[in-house]
């Protein structure tokens, strides 16, 4: 059979389902390639990870006996300006394909000495802005050992939504430690689950950049405790700038709460990274906070209240706080 693959989201990040589908079909002796408009295919797989807000299916016409559409992106609709996920429209890969070693040759520019995959699925957070809990369940559970999709590559891109929430976290962290590979926790780590024991294991993982998130005020105490434990045990060198804490804004917090979280992260000794939900409708004051915070040169050269965001020379304090130095 001749199999065609089509990555709706472009090819700037490896599409893991397509790599697994390719590996399975090649194991059956089939010819597999990215589909074009002219070749006749027995079957074409069209994969879409993101909703239409980020990537849209074009008017591509395939010459194929069968076309199979799959991926989370085809299960998302937009209703009243909000993305809605429909689990019944999102079909999982068959087990024999889900657990096959991926065909990394599909994306040679991104997979050179780099492996991609999941050790766990699911997340207990059930965030309104994220579909993982609805798609994969509220319990973070082990779904694979590292050896399923890693064979000695120097780099590992871990795609798990919430590895530390899994009860098998220690076993999985040990596998990452034993690999000796450089690990990128692409979706970040849930600081609430960082105990001294977990922090000791994280210290042994070869990781050049750590990512955490401080999204909700209700989790303040647990997150601060976990981040402080990380700093105390793992350590953090500001000169290397290798640890960031994402701060979700414009979602369900006030500007005062956003600034409060930034100050807390600063007090721990880590760097905040402002993420704005629906940035196009965010207030200007919030966008000014992001410009100051995420520009590391500016962030380290002045306090937010003294930041001058525009050419008129006025500081944040003068623009939004009436020039009162006591209002910080």
Image (tube, grey):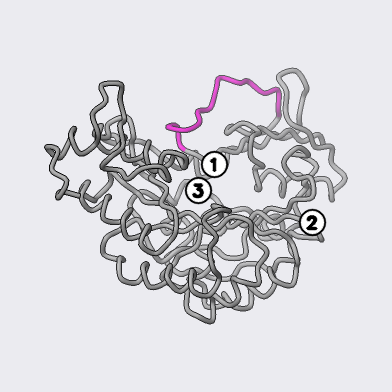
Determine which of the numbered discs, if any, sits on residue 302 in the image. none
Q: Nearer the viewer, residue 71 or 247?
A: 247
Question: Whole-percent x and y of residue 276?
Answer: 35, 41
Question: Whole-percent x and y of residue 89?
Answer: 47, 46
Queried whether the magenta region covers residue 188, the answer comes back as no
Q: Nearer the viewer, residue 94 or 65?
A: 94
Total of numbered circles in the picture? Answer: 3
Q: Nearer the viewer, residue 115 or 303?
A: 303
Q: Which residue is mark 1?
A: 49
Q: Is residue 104 left or right of residue 80?
A: right
Question: Whole-percent x and y of residue 169?
Answer: 57, 74
Task: Give the crowd class for mark 2: few <14, some 14-19, many >=20 residues within 10 Å.
Answer: some
Residue drawn at 37 percent across, 67 percent down: 223
Compared to residue 45, the image places residue 101 above or below, namely: below
Q: Which residue is mark 2?
A: 153
Magenta segment boundaries in residue numbering: 51-64
Question: Whole-percent x and y of residue 303?
Answer: 32, 45
Q: Nearer the viewer, mark 2 or mark 1?
A: 2
């Amino acid at each position: 059979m001749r199999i065609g693959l089509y990555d709706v989201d472009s090819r700037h990040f490896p599409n893991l389902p397509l790599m697994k589908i390719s590996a399975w079909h090649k194991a059956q002796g089939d010819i597999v390639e990215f589909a074009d408009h002219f070749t006749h295919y027995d079957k074409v797989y069209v994969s879409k990870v993101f909703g239409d807000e980020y990537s849209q299916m074009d008017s591509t016409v395939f010459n194929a006996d069968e076309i199979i559409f799959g991926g989370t992106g085809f299960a998302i609709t937009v209703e009243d300006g909000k993305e809605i996920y429909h689990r019944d429209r999102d079909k999982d890969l068959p087990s024999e394909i889900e657990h096959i070693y991926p065909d990394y040759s599909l994306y040679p520019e991104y997979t050179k000495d780099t492996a991609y995959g999941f050790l766990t699925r699911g997340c207990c957070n059930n965030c309104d802005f994220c579909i993982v809990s609805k798609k994969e369940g509220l319990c973070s559970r082990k779904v694979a050992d590292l050896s399923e999709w890693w064979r000695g590559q120097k780099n590992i891109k871990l795609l798990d939504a919430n590895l530390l929430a899994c009860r098998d976290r220690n076993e999985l962290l040990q596998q990452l430690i034993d690999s000796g590979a450089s690990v990128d926790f692409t979706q970040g780590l849930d600081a609430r689950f960082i105990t001294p024991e977990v922090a000791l294991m994280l210290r042994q993982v070869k990781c050049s950049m750590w990512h955490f998130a401080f999204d909700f005020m209700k989790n303040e105490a647990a997150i601060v405790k976990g981040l402080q434990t990380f700093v105390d045990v793992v350590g953090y060198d500001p000169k290397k700038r290798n640890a960031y804490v994402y701060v979700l804004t414009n979602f369900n917090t006030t500007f005062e709460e956003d600034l409060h979280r930034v100050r807390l992260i600063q007090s721990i000794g880590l760097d905040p990274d402002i993420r704005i939900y629906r940035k196009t409708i965010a207030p200007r004051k919030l966008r000014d906070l992001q410009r100051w915070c995420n520009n590391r040169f500016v962030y380290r050269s002045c306090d937010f209240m003294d930041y001058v965001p525009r050419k008129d020379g006025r500081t944040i304090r003068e623009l939004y706080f009436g020039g009162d130095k006591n209002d910080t």
